Image (cartoon, rainbow, N blue to C red):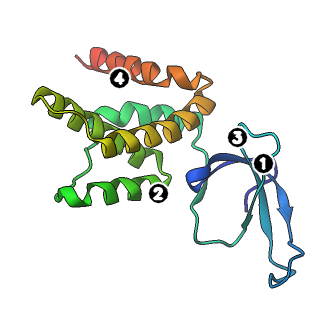
């Protein structure tokens, strides 16, 4: 179980703080079933109630600062997503988003950026689907990394690029 005060990633809701655990006094709901009370990050009044034993929505602890830094360092070696069938591209992106795993989201970001560069080099535009999922993945990952590394979210992309450049320079 997660502790009161702990921050978690809760599905597509993103980062939430566990405000407590309670039961629900509602018709048709077992009186002994426990629910987390979650407050989405950035919200002062919003609350989400989710069963402690739910298997429907991914809920995980935040990475540690060290894990976040290691993950950023791994980006150059991360493989892009293998999408064999263009018709499955959006489903692959959705699967990454639903996983709530930073590594998968970073792989997706890397994949979309490579794809975007390739399309532009061939005189084509980035697709609306790619842009939509890139924005979602960046929002999810940058919010978590920003919180862990104490760097403003709007500076995360620059921080990551600088860190990768530094790694490449030291290896050269």
Which residue does the numbered mark 4 point to in the structure image? 164
* Residue 88 against residue 120 in the figure, above or below: below
Q: Residues within 10 Å of mark 3 (few under 14, many from 20)?
A: some
Residue 151 lies, in percent from the top left, at: 58, 22
Which residue does the numbered mark 1 point to in the structure image? 46
Inter-mark Cα distance, 4 to 2? 25 Å
Q: Residues within 10 Å of mark 2 (few under 14, many from 20)?
A: some
Inter-mark Cα distance, 3 to 4? 28 Å
* Residue 104 against residue 125 in the figure, above or below: below
Residue 43 lies, in percent from the top left, at: 75, 40
Q: Are marks 1 and 3 in contact (CB under 8 Å)?
A: no
Secondary element under disc 2, as helix, strand or loop, is helix
Q: Residues within 10 Å of mark 1 (few under 14, many from 20)?
A: few
Inter-mark Cα distance, 3 to 2? 19 Å
Say whether disc 3 or disc 2 marks the residue closer to the N-terminus. 3
Mark linked to residue 61: none
User: Closer to the observer: label 4 or label 2?
Assistant: 2
């Amino acid at each position: 179980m997660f502790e009161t005060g702990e921050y978690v990633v809760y599905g597509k809701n993103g980062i939430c703080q566990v405000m407590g655990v309670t039961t629900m006094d509602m018709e048709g709901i077992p009186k002994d079933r426990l629910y987390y009370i979650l407050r989405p990050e950035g919200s002062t009044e919003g609350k989400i109630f989710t069963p402690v034993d739910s298997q429907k929505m991914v809920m995980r602890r935040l990475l540690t600062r060290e894990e976040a830094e290691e993950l950023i360092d791994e980006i150059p070696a991360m493989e892009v997503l293998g999408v064999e069938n263009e018709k499955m591209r959006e489903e692959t992106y959705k699967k990454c988003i639903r996983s709530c795993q930073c590594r998968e989201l970073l792989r997706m970001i890397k994949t979309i950026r490579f794809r975007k560069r390739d399309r532009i080099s061939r005189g084509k535009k980035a697709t609306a689907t790619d842009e939509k999922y890139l924005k979602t993945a960046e929002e999810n990952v940058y919010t978590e990394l920003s919180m862990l590394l104490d760097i403003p979210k709007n500076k995360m992309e620059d921080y990551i690029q600088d860190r990768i450049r530094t790694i490449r320079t030291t290896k050269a």
